[in-house]
Image (tube, grey):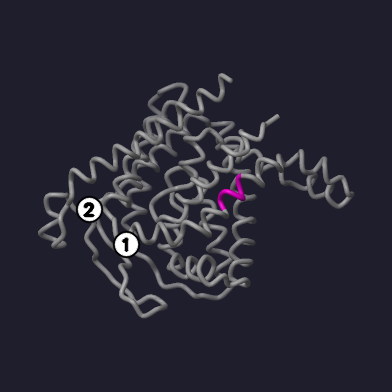
Amino acid sequence: MRSLKDYAVLYLKGLSMGGADVIPGVSGGTIAFITGIYDELLHSIKSIDAEAIRLVFTFRIAQAWKKVNGNFLIVLLAGLATAWISLARAMKYLLDNYQIGTWSFFFGLIIISTFQVLRQVRQRTAKVFLAFAVGVIVAYFITLLSPTSTPDALWFIFIAGAIAICAMILPGISGAFILLLMGKYEFILTKILIEFNIPVAATFAAGCLVGLWAFSHALTWVLDHYHDLTVAMLAGFMVGFLNKIWPWREATAYHLNSQGQQVVSFDRSVWPWDYLAKTGHNPQILYAILFAALGVLLVVGIEKVAALMKTK
């Protein structure tokens, strides 16, 4: 039985997941993993099945709510929604004005998170190392893909939601980045979080629900039957995606957004010592190291707090 304090902490975890999800390159699934709620999240989503629906339609609401771990899901969802609505503008501002510091913070956070995830591997075998390597390679090549032009029709918004949510619950894989590759990140961000377009929001949410339900079943089964291989591959995804959040980036392609402003549509990583020559901007190396260290300290702090709460 969770206390009020436990639910407050769970809400903050949802807030952290939502804040991560709005950034292309950072995964809310990573936050769920390092805060210790990943397995419970997957099993709670998986429990929304035919039996739960039958309980609802036979007016056994309390039983259905208990079966799907409703308190957990609603508090976590409240945190996610709060972050998506309130932090989208803030994250955009930070990335536009403090790019190196912001990316450095998340870079440090994901590096230390990878070690935290790998600690959950029970037996380090050759297959586990191979799974890790495959994860790194696959994720790295995903970061090299260029965004595509796609329709704004509601049917495609549904598909985009279903695919993006699958990425969002995978540690290391960024749902926001998948939307970017599908040419829908800016469209979704603007229509839902800024313009509050109800048809687009409802369609995207429906796609997310369908994708989340279907994918959680598959991922839970894989984790239950191939735990170490799956965890190793997820950690590999996290390492491979570091290329996308490398702090020093050079823009290689631009496009006009819905406001007629020129924005970066694709960029690539460069070495910090080449950054000044390629972009004309100061690489701010010490500044980057400081913020990366803050990201590391945040994860270590979260782990310490979680350990203290378990002992109480």
Callout 1 secondary element: helix
- Mark 2, other Cα within 10 Å: few <14 / some 14–19 / many ≥20: many
Q: Which residue occupies 45% across, 56% down?
A: 22
In this view of the protein, which residue sits in the foreground, 218 or 112? 112
On-image quarter of the N terminus: top right
In the rendered image, the vertical position of residue 184 relative to residue 57, given as above or below? below
Callout 2 secondary element: loop
Q: Which residue is mark 2?
A: 248
In the image as oriented, which residue stretches furthest toward the top? 311
Give left or right: position of 119 versus 200: left
Q: Which residue occupies 53% across, 31% down?
A: 226
Give left or right: position of 113 versus 82: left
Q: Which residue occupies 61% across, 34% down?
A: 5
Q: What is the tally of numbered marks visible in this picture?
A: 2
Residue span colored magenta: 76-80
Q: Which residue occupies 30% across, 64% down?
A: 266
Q: Earlier in the sequence, mark 1 or mark 2?
A: 1
| Numbered tag placed on residue 96 in the rendering | 1
Looking at the magenta stretch, what is its main secondary structure?
A: helix
Name which quarter of the figure residue 44 lies in.
top right
- How far across and down, in percent of the image, does residue 40 sit? 61, 36
- How far across and down, in percent of the image, does residue 131 sit? 41, 35
Give left or right: position of 118 versus 188: left
Is 77 within the magenta? yes
Q: Could you tell me the amino acid type at mark 2?
A: Trp
